[in-house]
Image (tube, rainbow, N blue to C red):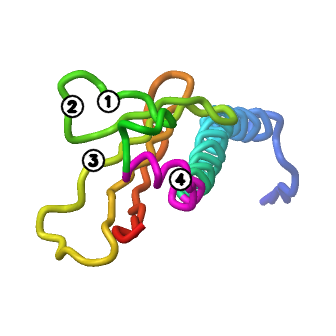
Amino acid sequence: MVTRNEKGVTLLEILISITIFSIILVSIMKFFPQITFTNKLNADKTQAINTARQILIEWQNSSNVKSFLKRPSSSPVLPAPLAGQDSEYYYFQTKEKFDEKIIIKRSAPPNFPSGSTEPRYIEIQLFSNSGTVLTKTYGYIILKVSD
């Protein structure tokens, strides 16, 4: 009886393993463009969030905005509200690479107790070039009533 000692790999086995490896590699490579797109989108959203926070702080601390909200008829800082929206002021501008929409309520919340301060709701919305909303943030502008 003759026994063979087969210790090598045949050419057919090598070709099959290369084919399987190629199929796996090609299917994994399809994910790389999607990952790059997702990373760019997340970077844009992060930048938009930081920009919106910065804009909110600027508007909350702006003496021009506060004087406009106290006496809108005597201060031309903000444009007129959009037609039919008499409870809000709208302001549009472009900052950095985002289109901004700023909404400020004309009056304090209805259940807010009267006192020496009066809050005004402000909302910042940032849009991408395609018009989709990247982020929204909101806060309050505190007005001193006694001034």
Mark 3–mark 4 Cα distance, whole angstroms, equals 15 Å
**Which residue position holds label 4?**
59
Q: Is 43 situated above or below 6?
A: above
Mark 4–mark 1 Cα distance, whole angstroms, equals 17 Å
Sequence-earlier tag: 4 or 1: 4
Mark 2–mark 1 Cα distance, whole angstroms, equals 7 Å
Q: Which residue is drawn at 83% across and 47% down?
A: 9
Q: Cβ–Cβ below 8 Å for labels 3 and 1? A: yes
Mark 3–mark 1 Cα distance, whole angstroms, equals 10 Å
**Nearest to the observer: residue 73 or residue 88:** 73
Q: Position of residue 113 (x, y in %)?
A: 17, 76
- Residue segment shown in magenta: 57-70
Which corner quadrant holds the C terminus?
Answer: bottom left
**Which residue position holds label 2?**
85
Q: Cβ–Cβ below 8 Å for labels 2 and 1? A: yes
**Nearest to the observer: residue 67 or residue 141:** 67
Sequence-earlier tag: 3 or 1: 1
